[in-house]
Image: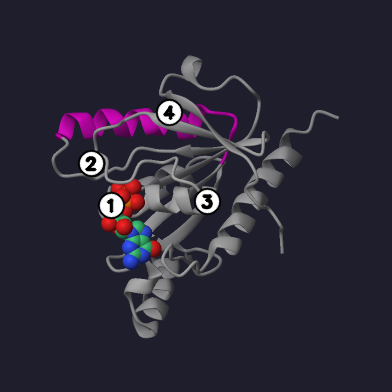
Amino acid sequence: MSSLEISEVSFRGSALKPSDRPGEFFPHVAIAGRSNVGKSSLLNWLFKQSLAKVAKAPGKTRTLNFFLINRSFYLVDLPGYGYAKVGKELREEWGRELGRYIHEEERLAGVVSLVDIRHGLTARDRDLQNLLLASSCDRQVVLTKADKVGRGHRANMRQTVQRELALHVPPLAVSVRTGEGRRDLLAGIDDMVNRWRTQHRSD
Ligand code: GDP
């Protein structure tokens, strides 16, 4: 198993337009999920510090937030989608912007897609998966808040999501409360970064 540990993290700003994104040719691993899925909590848990905001106004921020990890790659916090109070027009606009990021950003190595283990896939989660399937980047599905359900529900949900998305392996279940899944998630992120590096090696 990979031994990626996050030893250094620094917030490098928010951006949407390509020209505003950090300039280095470092791989990006983006973290996506609907509002309230537990994305900020998960990022802080990975970072072991509170850099990502929890309890922000839902759906308010629409920029990509860039966190430089170990001075070698970026974890990119994508805005939470699917929040009902955001109007249709804004949702569609954001969908187009997200689509452009996914299809056009050469540095995007992969997307970790968060799904609440209690609720399973939403229509917006499926939209995102379809975007990812049409692009060349890696995808990993992660079920959040695993501590909130019993063993039976967990096993069912892992099977259901695997089947519905035709994944090669069942999705990882994680919990920031119990610490479950952190090493496996870091290993998955490390794999995405390493695959991207292999593909983009210039020697
Ligand atoms: P975001 O909107 O996706 O950034 O979600 P937040 O990180 O703000 O989390 C939404 C809510 O879920 C908060 O009340 C968190 O405390 C809670 N939460 C997040 N992760 C977990 C988890 O692993 N277990 C439990 N029990 N609650 C969680």
Name the quadrant containing residue 52: top left
In the rendered structure, which amino acid carries the disc numbered 3? Lys
Q: Could you say which disc has been placed on residue 36 in the image?
A: 1
Mark earlier in primary sequence (4, 1): 1
Q: Tell me the residue that label 4 is attached to.
A: 100
SS of the residue under disc 1: loop
Bin the neighbour count of mark 3 within 10 Å (Cα to Cα): few under 14, some 14-19, many 20 and up: few
- Location of residue 190 in the rendering, given as x and y in whole percent from the top left corner: 65, 50
- Location of residue 96 in the rendering, given as x and y in whole percent from the top left corner: 33, 29
Bin the neighbour count of mark 1 within 10 Å (Cα to Cα): few under 14, some 14-19, many 20 and up: some
Mark earlier in primary sequence (2, 3): 3
Camera-near label (4 vs 3) is 3
Q: CA distance from mark 2 to mark 4?
A: 23 Å
Main secondary structure type of the part rendered in magenta: helix
**Closer to us: 119 or 4:** 4
Q: Tell me the residue that label 3 is attached to.
A: 48
Coloring applied to the structure:
one colour
Camera-near label (2 vs 3) is 3
Question: Marks 1 and 2: CB-CB under 8 Å?
Answer: yes
Mark earlier in primary sequence (1, 2): 1
Q: Name the side, left or right, on which 65 lies relative to 192.
A: left
- Location of residue 44 in the rendering, given as x and y in whole percent from the top left corner: 46, 49
Whether residue 34 is visible here, answered yes or no, is: no
Bin the neighbour count of mark 2 within 10 Å (Cα to Cα): few under 14, some 14-19, many 20 and up: some
Range of residues picked out in magenta: 87-109
